[in-house]
Image (cartoon, grey):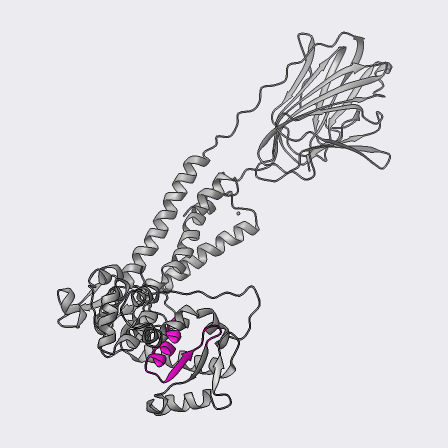
Amino acid sequence: MLAAPGLVAVGLLGGGIYDERYEAKQIVVMPVGDDGVRITEIVDDDFGTTERHGYERLIPNDFGQPQDIVVRAPHAEDDVYVTSIGDYQTRIRIGDPNITYIGQHRYELTYTLPNARISSGQLALDLSDGETDLETGRFEIVVTGFELTDPLCNTGAYGDVGGCELVRDGDVYRAVIEPLGPHQYVTIGGTITGLTEPVEVAAPALPKRRPDNSTAWAIGLGALGALAAGGGFTMARRLGRNEVAGSNAADAAYAAGSAHLVSDAELEAMATTEFEAPRGIRPWQGNMLLTEKVGTDTVSAWFSDMIAKEYLTLSGDSPQVLSRGPKADDAPPELHDDITKLFEVKGELEMGKYQPKLGSLWNRVLKDQQKEATASGWWTKFPPGTRPMFPKWIGVLVLFASGVVAISAWQQWLRAWPIAILAAFAIPAAFAGIAYRPLLPVRSAEGSALALRAESFRRFLEASEGKHVDWAWKHDLLREYSAWAVALGAADAWGRAIAGSTVPPQQAALQSMPLIVHTNRGEWNQAHTKPAPPSSSSSHSSGGFSGGFSGGGGGGGSSGNW
């Protein structure tokens, strides 16, 4: 939600798209030396939304190479770079090649043309030629220090006469062209009848600055982003409502009564605290019901359960060693075969290093869990192992908006306000689609009932104390409850409760063996996962519900930006 306002604040998004142009130029001409003229250009340059280093001037050398160059840029870099282009032209660049600007900036450039031939008694000076690509909103010419007869001003295409007037204005001669289009020539001239002391010419007032509405736009776009994100959450929450039977928590926990729809948060609020493990499901299924996922956690819970049943044994300290359990022969036939294959070469497997057979069994268990999740009937939409999706029309809308924003960034259109508005919607909407997808699975009434019982038991394990461990030990449930603690993300709390119990230490270590799958998760991951590049990583989730872009003179030349 902060992305679009943040991009507006740093000037990358919104603000409007403006064309590059000269808002105004003032050209002051005065005599200097025996035959030269001193020219001062005050240029109000508007780069618009085009990134530029600064102002550039190309001056023919027919009145001599420009000398005594002085530049000033009050609000931009004013480094000056003077280069010759052949023998005929001099290029003056103002700015820093490592810095670019957009928007409005003033540049002042003063230079001398030493051989302007004013000693001939004629002033003939080009001030702009047809190579200037940009429009100038107001082009003002001021001539001071000359007495002229028949002053003239020509503008237009090469050879055009007239189009402007150079008239006496007190101690100076002045011409104003509003506007001066691109590729237009400007020439001034007249007969020089005398030279006078040049008068100081006041610089024009700065053009009106464009208003900065970025704060208001940032607030507005932030609100739009919040609306998009909130809309995504609200829609996901509604689409992912679960079926719940009955009118109260007790009915819901046992799927008794007619079904209605509740959100994940409302379902979680129905959970209580239950000391008995959910009947009819295994610990890994409890994890799946709460997180609505199958993956590392559910498979880890499966192995923990196999250890609790004593089909497998985990012993040692570091590294841990996995071996055949004392009750392996009592395992169901298919599982018995898996255990036999797991240890047919070696009688035990060392954790902490890759074990191909363990990795193979791990992957098969994962596939089986995905199939079981789909066939369980505990979800009416998007069971674990499938990809939750918003309705297609929402995906198409967000994808289209995101595509337009991406193309606009490529084409540098991000400062257009329609694109900023679209980005303020598309960015949070796209991220909301990713963030809130876990809310979309819909549990059936039976699935909700089992999830409630699993959550209620998780709360018991999380809040358990030593006396609860003593009770579980006396009823031969300590191993099973330890497996459930691993599956439901309560292993740490249950481990603390065991430490605070009166169970003899040797028995506590033996009975809590399933917890080792959790406490030595790193060794287990290394044992079943092929070595990965150093940049790879894995994530872990615990219990709880899933919701939780003219001519004829000399001098002159063209101007531009670089």
Instruction: Count every numbered label the image shows and give the total.
Output: 0
> Where does residue 524 sit, x and y in percent of width and height?
46, 74
Q: Nearer the viewer, residue 444 or 155?
A: 444
> Where does residue 116 sit, x and y in percent of width and height?
83, 20
Q: Is residue 345 left or right of residue 157?
A: left
Q: Which residues are magenta?
A: 297-320
Whether residue 399 can be seen here: yes
In the rendered image, the vertical position of residue 122 relative to residue 334, given as above or below: above
In the rendered image, the vertical position of residue 73 relative to residue 322, given as above or below: above
Q: Is residue 20 left or right of residue 232?
A: right
> Where does residue 302 sit, x and y in percent of width and height?
36, 78
Q: Nearer the viewer, residue 237 or 342?
A: 342
Q: Nearer the viewer, residue 64 or 511?
A: 511
> Where does residue 149 sit, x and y in percent of width and height?
76, 11
Question: Looking at the rendering, which quadrant does residue 145 occupy?
Answer: top right
Q: Residue at point 36% right, 72% down?
A: 515
Whether residue 381 can be seen here: no
- Looking at the rendering, in which quadrant would you find the C terminus? top right
Q: Is residue 26 left or right of residue 488?
A: right
Residue 316 painted magenta: yes
Q: Residue at point 66% right, 7% down?
A: 170
Residue 256 painted magenta: no
Question: Looking at the rendering, which quadrant does residue 501 occupy?
Answer: bottom left
Q: Nearer the viewer, residue 311 or 360?
A: 311
